[in-house]
Image: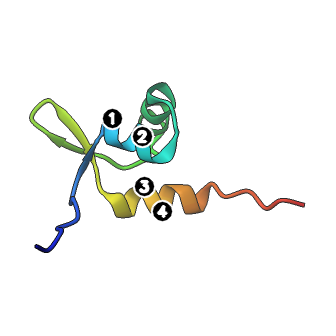
Amino acid sequence: MEVIPKILLNIRQVTETTGISRASIYRQMKAGQLPFVKVGSRTLFRPADLQDFVNRNVQASG
């Protein structure tokens, strides 16, 4: 059976997969740094937008 990747993730899934707190996610949303999708009262995220957010926030170690 083929596994179909999720198109949208909810806030709980985002916190679990990224390790970013719920409060931090909402701050980034409010600041316009993390795109999201509203479906009714649900707030959802596209995996590609999450990856872009992470990539933009990578700090070079040095």
Q: Do the residues labelled 4 and 3 touch (CB within 8 Å)?
A: yes
Q: Distance between the residues labelled 1 and 4?
A: 19 Å
The residue that label 1 is drawn on is 12
- Disc 2 marks a residue whose amino acid type is Glu
Mark 1 near mark 2, Cβ–Cβ under 8 Å?
A: yes
Which residue is located at x 42 percent, y 40 percent? 16
What kind of element bears circle 3?
Answer: helix
Q: Residue at x 45, y 35 (%)?
A: 25
The answer to whether 9 appears left or right of 60 in the picture is left
**In-image side of 62 versus 13 (left or right):** right
Disc 2 target residue: 16
On the rendered structure, is 56 left or right of 27?
Answer: right
Q: Which of marks 2 and 4 is in front?
A: 2
x, y percentage for residue 33? 48, 47
User: Considering the numbered disc 1 on the image, is that residue within a helix, a strand or a loop?
Assistant: helix
Q: Which amino acid does label 1 sit on?
A: Arg
- Distance in Å between CA atoms under marks 4 and 3: 5 Å
> Mark 3 or mark 2, which is nearer to you?
2
User: Which mark is first along the chain, 1 or 3?
Assistant: 1
Label 4 residue SS: helix
- Specify whether residue 33 is in view: no
The residue under label 4 is 52
Q: Is residue 12 visible?
A: yes
In the rendered image, the vertical position of residue 20 relative to residue 1, given as above or below: above
Q: How far apart are marks 1 and 2 (CA)?
A: 6 Å
